[in-house]
Amino acid sequence: MAAKLGDWLDERLAWRQVWETIFLRNIPKVNWWYTLGSATLFLGINQLVTGILLTIYYVPTPDHAYDSVHYITTQVPAGWLIRGLHHWGASAMVVFTAIHMLRVIMQGAYKFPREVTWFTGVGLLVVVVGFGFTGYLLPWDQKAYWATQVGTRIAGTPPLIGDWVLEVVRGGEDISAVTLARFFGAHVWIFPAALLLLISVHMYLVVRHGISAPPNREE
Amino acid sequence: MKEKRRLDRREFMSIATFGIGGLISAIMGIPAIAYILGPVLRKTETEEWIRLGSVSKVELGVPTLFKAKLERQTGWIITEKELSVYILTDNGRDFVAMSNLCTHLGCRVRWIGDQETFFCPCHNASFDQAGEVLDGPPPAPLDRFEVKVEEDQIYVFGG
């Protein structure tokens, strides 16, 4: 029955070819360091799922943000788990993205023909850091507020345009309801859109070129 | 003789991948369902004995209005809700507690002393002293609460 359905779909979608291209492709003899990209992808999916779940209860306004987060953590069944996974997953994601990048640098995996994979990877690193920065404000507690105070000040340090950048990031002169709302908007719409776009290209290229073999001294 | 089928490496890896993947999905999926359904399963409207006030305020044979403030929590927001109850007694011992909400569409009824009726301003309905419908669209008499008196205080059971 399942095989019949599989055949029926395959005649119309050619899904077996897609499956083989993605999952049954040949790879060189590699080691555990080569799993970091997949590990980061797994963490990204974790962030996506738990993040969507958090928006069911979270409200991004100064009078409700802290209380709704508190409600998630203490009242909602498994709320502590969902929030915990999102919180720790976020830190893990930054760490794994960075180690993944280091592996690519050290083994020269960014070289021809994989430069564009590298470019999109750099874009992804920026997006991940953006996620971290905007997500940090959302609980709206003292740590969030002051960390964003410091972070946005740093954004305001460039000469000439600094003051303007600071106001754009904060949505005004001070951190306010406007700041919280735009950080939330960036966190759940702008960065996810950028992430999906960049990941699509990144992974297409990984499949297209295959992964590079570890460099060999004798070659 | 039956030949023993051995699992080759590829098959083992495939089963392990799907097995571990399914396990992780279940570990994340089951709490996710509990998380979404949590507030639905929780009982928010808890009924309890609510103190209205002193028995001495009730006039014999005249429905007397009592108001009580109730705190209700929905999500992380605590709201105050007002409960209004008409108390009627003919002998000072047996009490009847009636809701002031019209059974038609939930407007608030008012006791009109000179006409001896409860009057609902929304569709000109009227009820008698005991809450029975006299005139207008309401389909049922005024709702009643369970009532008790303890140490000269009147309590109704509701929420």
Image (cartoon, coloured by chain):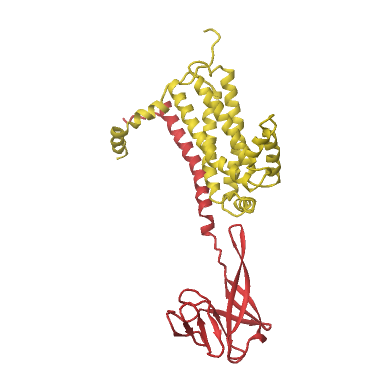
The quadrant holding residue B92 is bottom right
Q: Residue B12 sits in which quadrant?
A: top left
Quarter where residue B87 is shown? bottom right
Q: Nearer the viewer, residue A167 or A147?
A: A167
Residue A143, x across and y down, in percent: 70, 43
Task: Check the image and report above or below for B125 versus A164.
Answer: below
Percent coordinates x, y for residue A212 in the rendering: 50, 18
Q: Is residue A143 left or right of residue B26?
A: right
The N terminus of chain A - image quarter: top left
Q: Position of residue B63 (x, y in %)?
A: 58, 86
Position of residue B113 in the picture relative to residue A150 (left or right): left
Q: Colour of chain A?
A: yellow
Residue found at the very far top of the displayed protein = A218
Label count reads: 0
| Figure check: A79 above or below A214 | below
Residue A115's place in the image compared with A14, above or below, is above
**Vertical placement of residue B22 versus A160, above or below:** below
| B22, B117: nearer the viewer | B117
Q: Position of residue A99 (x, y in %)?
A: 60, 26
* Residue drawn 71% across the image and 46% down it: A142
Q: Chain B: what color?
A: red
Q: Quick check: A180 left or right of B143?
A: right
Query: Which residue in the rendered view is the most extreme toward the front?
Result: A160
